[in-house]
Image (cartoon, helix red, strand yellow):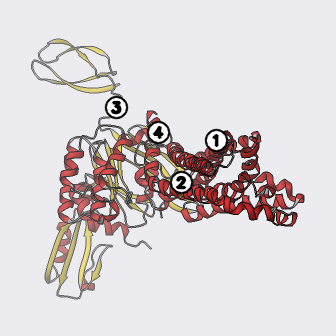
Amino acid sequence: MTNIIVACPQCKYQMSVQGNPGERIELICPKCKIYGFFQFPEESSTAPTEDVIVVKNLTKYYGKIKGIEDLTFSVRKGEIFGFLGPNGAGKTTTIRTLLGYLHPTNGEAYILGKNIAHNIVNIKRDVGYIPGELNLYGHLTGRQFLDYFGSLRNKQLPLLTDLLQIFDVPLDRKIKGYSRGMKQKLGIIQAFMDDPDIVIMDEPTSGLDPLLQQKFYDFLRGQKKKGKTIFFSSHVLSEVDKICDRIGIIRNGKLVALEDVETLKEKMGKLFRVKIKERPEKFTGPKNMKVRDGLIEFVTSGDIDYWVKQLSHYTILDLEIHAFSLEDIFIHYYEGQA
Amino acid sequence: MNNIFRLKIALQTMKDYWKITIILTFLFMAMAAMYAGMFPSFEKSLIEMMDSEFIESFNFFPHADQMHTYVGFLTLELYNIFWLLLLAIMFGFIASSCIAKEIEGKTIDILMSNPVSRKQIVLEKFMGLIPMIIIINFSMMVVIIGITVALNESLNYVNLLVVHLISIPYFLAVISIGLLFSAIIDDKMKSSIFMIAILIGMFIINSISLMASDYEVLGFFSFLHYFDTFNVLEFGEIDGAGLVVFISVTVICLIGAIVYFEKRDIEIT
């Protein structure tokens, strides 16, 4: 049984109606007494926000060494999802397990509704990938490489011309003569050229100069507008802050945060940085208070008023209150880590 | 599923080895021309040297007693060493590095980002090496025919064709062992060294089994035991068991390579 609020078509009076999905019921408006039928909507088979990548308890051990443990998260259609973590946290392992290079020790994952364990070749028809350690065939020219990969995709390459314009590479030179940035550009071109529904990227902007990074972000936003999903790992927080809708933070192979970038920032509270004339130790702040270079630092959520009033008993030389940047959040999650 | 019949990886493999194919073709053509062409100048002294002691000292080669005949000379100098051993080492070397180098060079990541299965990669790499075998194989046959005609020696050309036809399953067996190593060992040098060790090992085993009759049974573990080029060239004898061995080794190694490659993790470190 579900409850639905229905508005009377004549007097707009709102009434609560109870029924089963698909059921047709008789209604009389209690206000204007108009008589009619109401049809409950069928239960939709797809969730309103479709998850295109679903990861359930994914675990990968390399023998006894932990790669990732018990990862559970999902990526929604049309979002840019940032996967954060320092080097060695398990970002690459996650991506390589998702794409079938590594067989999971435990757990499962679905991409576009297909199980990665049984359907990986089919999945790759609709998924592009830029590896973290991008190695291309040095003995081929850029053009030969794209021709070869085009033939392996075996489908139309609607974005190829556009991409070649944005990310200009010397197509007739052998790839072994390419600079790191050029290789990265070619990697981007091959991943997006057939306009796949999802693109998974492992630190895609490494090697790109700031101008190209900007062009790349613009391109990603364009893809997002078309309903394409982007999943990428990074440790460049400014870029994540700029383009990601949601982030997952991974530490020691485990997911420690999974949130909307904005919500996460709000939840983290405000950062106080105060300099007082008195000795900093005299001030008793919240538990997380620290004194660094004579500056008092602490984090508080919500009760700004209280702390400002507490501080008013001292002589304030400098005061800074600001929202958490992604970098602060990141450091927060990693502090105290061995 | 239709992807596997388009053979794009096989085609690319063929293109990648195109230069090597041409170089090896000319090298082995030159080698064949040289050895076959040398026979007249050696013939006389060989006939004189053909006493039992001399033959005895060469008995680790099959049919050393026939060294003074054209067919015997060809078999001993050309087919046994340069063909069955050296060319097999070349093919084995190439095959045993062809998947390993993609993993070692980390290009496997970008290759597998395409909708291609692991099975398909192994099979197409295998198929991509076949044209090289066929080209080198038959171009050398043509050279032998040419030299034989020029020297006015007698040689049964049907038997010659049969030798080169049997060579195909022989080399296929070699490259399938190479591919199996290549699918298992990530380091292309290590994988190639294993392969070469096996081929030289087979050669040594065969020689031992020929020299010492106590160890004759060892010969069963060598490919060379199943491919007696002299008997084929001279008498047209085809070793059916040999063909069965080559084909079964090919099939078993290919299946092994596919199964292992499907199951393994592809790690890049």
Determine the CA span between mark 3 and mark 4. 20 Å
Determine the CA span between mark 2 and mark 3. 34 Å
In the rendered structure, which amino acid carries the disc numbered 4? Asn
Where does the image place residue A307, in percent across and percent down from the top left? Answer: 20, 71
In the rendered structure, which amino acid carries the disc numbered 3? Thr
Determine the CA span between mark 1 and mark 2. 44 Å
In the rendered structure, the answer to whether residue B178 lies left or right of residue B269 reads: right
Q: Residue at x 49, y 58 (%)?
A: B23
Which residue does the numbered mark 1 point to in the structure image?
A: B161
Chain containing mark 4: A
Label 3 element class: loop
Label 2 element class: loop
Where does the image place residue B117, in percent across and percent down from the top left? Answer: 48, 43
Callouts 3 and 4 close, C-beta under 8 Å: no
Q: Is circle 2 on the same chain as circle 3?
A: no
Q: Nearer the viewer, mark 3 or mark 4?
A: 4
Q: Is circle 1 on the same chain as circle 4?
A: no
Which residue does the numbered mark 3 point to in the structure image?
A: A46
Q: Is residue A286 above or below residue A5?
A: below
In the rendered structure, the answer to whether residue A239 lies left or right of residue B200 reads: left
Depth order, front residue of B249/B237: B237
